[in-house]
Image (spheres, rainbow, N blue to C red):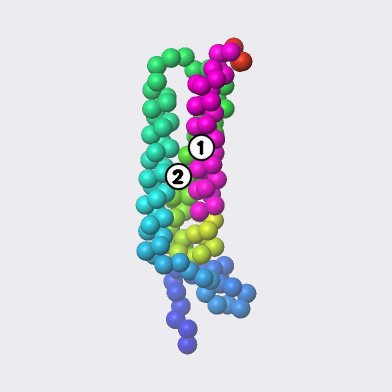
Amino acid sequence: METQDPFLDRADRDPQGQPAPRIESTFRNGSLTAFSVVIGFSLSFLTRWAELPGAWHRFDIVALSAIVLGSSCQIVALARLLSIQSLLLARYNGAVRLFLTGLGLTALGVLVVVGGDVFDYGEKRFGG
């Protein structure tokens, strides 16, 4: 007789009723650490950038939006990974995809900031 896992519900079983594939908790713990470190860097960049002296330009809104949205995706992914349900492979993979989306958005925002500083986008092109 199969032992019932209290953390699995019917949605966490395949069509034949077998438990869904899982990952090892030690693997998830490493991912939690990596997610946390990257989120720390993302939030640190945002904080440092916001504290810089000088005027903000209209073009900075694009970068700010991408960084805030990306950081938010990363934080939601971390929250999903903290759930015991993230030991299920499908849920773990979903959290990783969301995190990578957030990482890409944050990187895009950082590139916009750096490009704006290097090429003076804010002042010359947008009258900011």
Q: Relative to 124, does residue 82 appear above or below in the rendering? A: below
Residue at x 41%, y 42% (from the top left corner): 39
Residue at x 38%, y 34% (from the top left corner): 44
Magenta segment, which residues? 96-124
Residue at image mark 1: 107
Is disc 2 surrounded by few (<14), some (14 to 19) or many (20+) residues within 10 Å? some
As drawn, the label of residue 75 is 2
Residue 127 at x, y percent in the picture: 59, 12
Q: Is residue 60 left or right of residue 30?
A: right
Q: Relative to 12, does residue 111 appear above or below in the rendering? A: above
Tell me, yes or no, if residue 69 can be seen here. Answer: no
Tell me, yes or no, if residue 127 can be seen here. Answer: yes
Q: CA distance from mark 2 to mark 1?
A: 15 Å
Tell whether position 100 is magenta.
Answer: yes
- Element on which disc 2 rests: helix
Looking at the rendered image, the quarter that the C terminus falls into is: top right
Q: Is residue 78 left or right of residue 63?
A: left
- Element on which disc 1 rests: helix
Q: Earlier in the sequence, mark 2 or mark 1?
A: 2
Tell whether position 23 is magenta.
Answer: no
Residue at x 54%, y 68% (from the top left corner): 12
Which residue lies most toward the bottom here?
1
The amino acid type found where label 1 is placed reads Ala
| Main SS category, magenta section | helix
The amino acid type found where label 2 is placed reads Ile
Which residue lies most toward the front here?
118
As drawn, the label of residue 96 is none
> Where is residue 75, by image quadrant?
top left
Residue at x 59%, y 73% (from the top left corner): 14
Residue 15 at x, y percent in the picture: 62, 74
Query: Cβ–Cβ below 8 Å for labels 2 and 1?
Result: no
